[in-house]
Image (tube, helix red, strand yellow):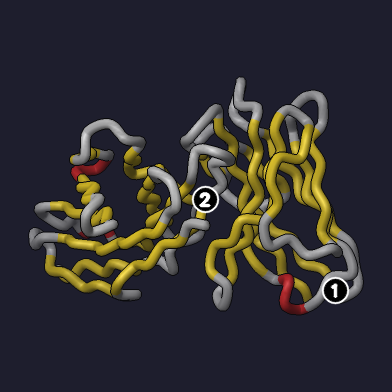
């Protein structure tokens, strides 16, 4: 069975600063890994995904994530935070046999002006 | 806009009642997934349908059931509602490994 741990339920960054959101996973088979973003009162929007191709994955809105098998991690970064990045971010894992997603608890990002 | 639609957007009902949530997947997507998002449990997978057949089951209560129709839309039926069923219910659809989520239905049980 797969599971996800997101370190830090809240992250506060200054506008223009680096955003780093941590995600560690466990999976019995090679995983598919995803980052989703949820803006207030909205659904989940896919930011990026890893599906066993390149280990550095680029997504929308300037975000990227690196898959590190040895560390079982898939941390999300953005070099320069913008006010519009304030949202909740979810890391998720699935396996190829059924694709159902297991989500982390989420990290809420606030951006200070 | 993900292309996945859910109705209604909000639902307020009383304990003991039954409600039906509806989901229309993206054009061409055969798989539909249902998730529940609550403050205490987070985002949890409930059930998956693929081309009309149940494919996988998660933490879905016996009071809840779902089905997928020939036109591929899906319905989630929640019965004998309890206060703890208040949550945001999401539907997602996919072709293979990537799921696209609808805007959700917010259920409030009073």
Q: Residue at x 27, y 39 (%)?
A: A60
Q: Position of residue B24 (x, y in %)?
A: 68, 34
- Residue under pointer 1: B14
Q: Which mark is residue A90?
A: none
State the SS at label 1. Answer: loop
Left or right: B8, with A35 as reference point: right
Residue found at x 20% / y 47%: A66
Tell me the mark number nearer the camera, choosing from 1 and 2: 2
Q: Residues within 10 Å of mark 1 (few under 14, many from 20)?
A: few
Q: Is A15 placed left or right of B39 in the picture?
A: left
Side of B37 relative to A51 (left or right): right
Give the CA distance from mark 1 to mark 2: 30 Å
**Which residue is at the front of the view, B22 or A101?**
A101
Read off the chain for label 2: A
At horizontal 77% and vertical 73% (from top left) the residue drawn is B109
**Looking at the rendering, which quadrant does residue B89 occupy?**
bottom right
Q: Position of residue B33 (x, y in %)?
A: 64, 44
- Whether residue B24 sits left or right of residue A98 in the image: it is right
B84, A82: nearer the viewer: B84
Residue at which label 2 appears: A101
Q: Residue most toward the front?
A: A28
């Amino acid at each position: 069975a797969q599971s996800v741990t997101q370190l830090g339920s809240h992250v506060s960054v200054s506008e223009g600063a680096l955003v780093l959101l941590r995600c560690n996973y466990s999976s019995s088979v090679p995983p598919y890994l995803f980052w989703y973003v949820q803006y207030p009162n909205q659904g989940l929007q896919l930011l990026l995904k890893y599906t066993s191709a390149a280990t550095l994955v680029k997504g929308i809105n300037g975000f990227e994530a690196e898959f590190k098998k040895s560390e079982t991690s898939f941390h999300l970064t953005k070099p320069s935070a913008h006010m519009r990045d304030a949202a909740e971010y979810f890391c998720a894992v699935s396996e190829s046999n059924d694709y159902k997603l297991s989500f982390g608890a989420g990290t809420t990002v606030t951006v200070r002006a | 806009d993900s292309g996945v639609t859910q109705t209604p957007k909000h639902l307020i009902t009383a304990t003991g009642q039954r409600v039906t949530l509806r989901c229309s997947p993206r054009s061409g997507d055969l798989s539909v997934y249902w998730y529940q998002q609550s403050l205490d449990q987070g985002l949890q997978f409930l059930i998956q349908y693929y081309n009309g057949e149940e494919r996988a089951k998660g933490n879905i209560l016996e009071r809840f059931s779902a089905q997928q129709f020939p036109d591929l839309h899906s319905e989630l039926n929640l019965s004998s509602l309890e206060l703890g069923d208040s949550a945001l219910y999401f539907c997602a659809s996919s072709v293979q490994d990537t799921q696209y989520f609808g805007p959700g239905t917010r259920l409030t049980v009073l």
